[in-house]
Image (cartoon, rainbow, N blue to C red):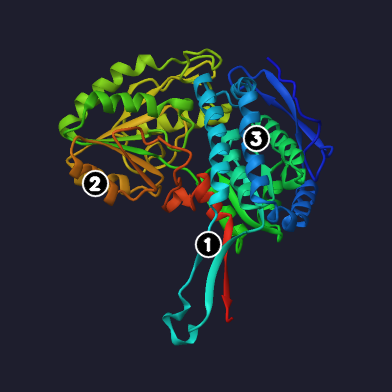
Amino acid sequence: MSFTPPYPDGLPIGDGWAPAPGAATVRFPYDDSPVADAPVGDVDLARRAVEHAAGLRGAVAKLPTRTRRAVLAGVADALARVADGMEELLILETGKPRVDCRVEVTRAISTWQAAADEVAQIHGRTVPLDLLPSGDGMVGYWTRRPVGVVAAIAGFNYPMMLASHKIAPAIAAGCPVVVKPAPPTPLATLWLTDLVRTELAAHGAPPGTVQLVTGDVEVGRTLTTHPDVALVSFTGSAAVGHRIARDAAPRKVVLELGSNAALVVAADADLDAAADAVIRGGYYASGQACIAVQRVIAVESVAEDLRAKIAARLPEVVVGDPRDEATRVAALIDPGATDRVLGWIADARTAGATVLAGGERTGRCITPALLADVPDGRPAWDDEIFGPVVSVRAVPDLDAAIATVNASRYGLHAAVFTRDLATAFRAIDELDVGGVVVNEVPGYRSDVMPYGGVKDSGLGREGPKYAIEEMTVTRMAVIRP
């Protein structure tokens, strides 16, 4: 069950691979068996990577569009060739069920393809300076220019795909990038980085356009505060994201943070479809997804029937070894996460919630939990649980449902189930979130759409087209002929 890296030893720093000062064993979350030893970097290597990236700013910015497109398309093809191996590695280092790891690889390939499509669509436009008399006879236009060095920090739950959503737009925009994967899950991102650097070299571009450093919090702080870094792109918890935003100022930040995604069920909803969405959308990736269904807010006239339908479907959510094709819930990333989720379930029960099903430890896993009537102020309702737990609450009407969604400090995605177009458009207009999904899971994400949140769920947007905009700045040109 061990993994033999197909890339060099050390860390991809500069145009080669640098020896790492330390190492740590990556362990399979399901049974704690060793997967592989991963290199662990330090602050000195982080500084060295940023300084090398800063030295490449001009060269990377001048890479022809055709070269950037060829590299991006080449990485998509390279990932497709190793898709099966990458899937196996992701299972081992993340502990996610096989079906979710397969989706991650497929979406990562799509992200690189989309970035290749977008690289030729980076436009400027003319400006009518003669709207004022002072502009008569003058020519004005703006173009988009690379922002500079990007520091990209990804989460553990979808490590290779999250890194792809940062690296691919950076290359498309003409920005050198230094990547830091989450400490528990560096292996797939190291492999991805090697594939990218191989494509860069094959097309005459500096391999050091993309570098990777692992390490602790101080390594991350070095990347986010280094004066040569122009933009920090971070995916992770709200608490860490807020600290990064403070530390990084005045640098630009793109923050994809947490959520406690809501699914609203209107009185006229198809309850079978809504229950199916909860089963599919609440427990995938063992609940370790920022837009997994966490809160189901149902109009009280249908809430009891909906709860019964969800409970009847729960046995379909197979718990077990993530390598098995049928598994839908496996172990969380580490025992500390498991203890925290179980603690939040116990806290909710003490506060008056009812555990309708699940929520028990089985080996290193948690059985899919369905809670009812978790009160406000409890972390299982207010915060991001990041585990296989769904809470259902009945509310009097649609007004109360929308108000309940909006009362959260988070606002990433929400869903509404209804047969009424007026209800659907009202939800789109009034829900204070980054994305509203009608009659589908809130976890629906196409990798070409703008993705991001409001409030404590983040700042900025991902998706190749929109990330490229974040990673570029406008430059105005004013000419008097």
At label 2, counting other C-alpha atoms closer than 10 Å, the crowd grade (few under 14, some 14-19, many 20 or more) is few
Task: Name the amino acid type tagged 1.
Answer: Gly
The amino acid type, in three-letter code, at marker 2 is Phe
Of badges 1 and 3, the one in the foreground is 1
The quarter in which the N terminus is drawn is: top right
Q: Camera-side residue: 34 or 266?
A: 266
Q: How many marks?
A: 3
Question: Mark number for residue 425?
Answer: 2
**First-in-chain label (3 vs 2):** 3
Q: Is 296 placed left or right of 136 in the picture?
A: left
Whichever of labels 1 and 3 marks the residue nearer the N terminus, that label is 3
**Which label was assigned to residue 124?**
1
Q: Earlier in the sequence, mark 1 or mark 2?
A: 1
> At numbered mark 3, what does the secondary structure look like: helix, strand or loop?
helix
Q: Are marks 3 and 2 in contact (CB under 8 Å)?
A: no
User: Which residue position holds label 3?
Assistant: 75
Q: Position of residue 304 (x, y in %)?
A: 20, 26
Residue 407 point in image, percent of width and height: 32, 49
* Dot in front, 1 or 2: 1
Q: Is residue 423 left or right of residue 53?
A: left
